[in-house]
Image: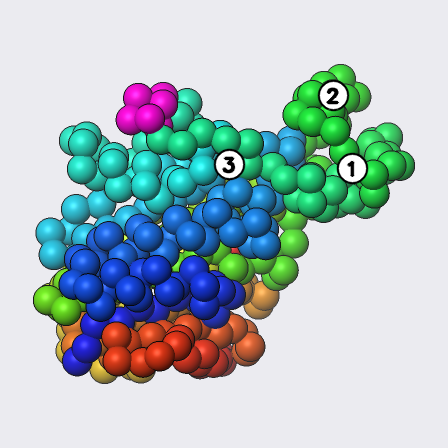
Amino acid sequence: MSALILVNGEVRDECIQPGMQALRQGAPAIDVAELVARAVESDAGDHSVGFSGLPNILGEVELDASIMDGATLASGAVSALKGYLHPVSVARQVMERLPHVLLTDAGAARFAAEINAEAGDLLTPEAKAIYLKRLNAVGRDWGLEIRDWRLEIGDWSEISNLQSLISSSNVPLIDLVARAIRYHEGGDTMNIIVRDGAGRLVSAVTTSGVAWKYPGRVGDSPIIGAGSYADDRHGAATCTGMGELTIRHGTALRAVLALSYGKSIDEAGRETIRDLRRMSGARDAWVRLLLVDKNGAVGGYCTRPGATLKVQTIDENRPRVIESEHVAE
Ligand code: ASP
């Protein structure tokens, strides 16, 4: 089976192209995965990843990312990273330069500074306006009315004003988050699985996480075994959707284990999603699973209809969009 790139359907073809070119030239899967993930992190039109990602409840963009090399099971990850443009590259450096797998928050930022990772403001005016609109809609009971959210909202200092307003007006952040979060609208966290010409598998995930999250919330994207897993001997898996569910369930690892027990890719995908549904009991469970087996067969499995994936082999001119299979209860 040939080398390929598999991503979630929201990723633009333009972001896949440089990776496909590199794959054709014989680049290893890990370089290709990082290249494509970086392109998506720079995409200002994508409000769930990197630059222009939607912020936490305090208006701060906190990024989660991971990368895993299926040849060695080496992995690197960062969570709640603020102020750096390419968390996937920081995650890769964690893997390559530290005896650790996951760095979080201030430690992750310190490491990013030490390796000279590209720093930058992540909150774009558009993302800021979406945030203020949401805060306006859910914060009225606590006097959080931002009447001029439609205007170009100045700079970071205005977000700090808002943060002091939230702390000084006794707004219970717990209640504000519960009211603001809308899981069912999320889901275009960036997932990528690459299989290179040598049969090496790499999975990577990068995201700003669920919008309006509690500060410091870590999703499944940087949790190896939950949002991502790769093992050349069996296959690779990544997830989008409600990270809390896939962390509890160990979804990506379970899917790869199912392949290791000899299940076909469809059996592994369906059984993993079915099991997640049963385990969580959540009627509104929203999770999409991307799978590649060791031979390069691909599949997408989802708790609700309509989610897509994109796949391109090195022999194809452009990515194909595939509807992921809706796995009913
Ligand atoms: N899985 C991501 C998280 O929980 C969110 C998403 O896929 O939209 O942070």
Q: Is residue 101 left or right of residue 209?
A: left
Work out whether mark 1 precedes mark 2 in sequence or the reverse, and give the earlier one: 1
Q: Which mark is residue 322?
A: none
Q: Which residue is mark 1?
A: 152
Q: Quadrant of the N terminus?
A: bottom left
Across and down, in percent, residue 264 comes to 23, 82
Q: Main secondary structure of the magenta part?
A: helix
Under circle 2, the secondary element is helix
Q: Amino acid at mark 1?
A: Glu
Indicate the position of residue 189 as horizontal and vertical percent values: 48, 55
User: Is 274 positioned to the left or the right of 185 in the image?
Assistant: left
Q: CA distance from mark 1 to mark 2?
A: 16 Å
Q: Nearer the viewer, residue 309 or 282?
A: 309
**Type of amino acid at the residue the image marks with label 2:** Asn
**Residue 319 in the image: above or below residue 124:** below
- Which residue is label 3 attached to? 62
- Residue 161 numbered tag: 2
* Residue 119 visible somewhere in the drawing: yes
Of the pair 272 and 205, the residue shown nearer to us: 205
Residue drawn at x 17%, y 46% is 74
In magenta, the rendered stretch is 110-116
Q: Nearer the viewer, residue 77 or 114?
A: 114
- Which label's residue is closer to the chain start, 3 or 2? 3
- Residue 301, percent across and down? 41, 75
Q: Residue 131 falls in which quadrant of the image?
A: top right
Q: Quick one: SS at disc 3? A: loop
How many numbered marks does the figure carry?
3
**Residue neighbourhood size for the residue with mark 3, other residues' Cα within 10 Å, grouped as few (<14), some (14–19), many (≥20):** many
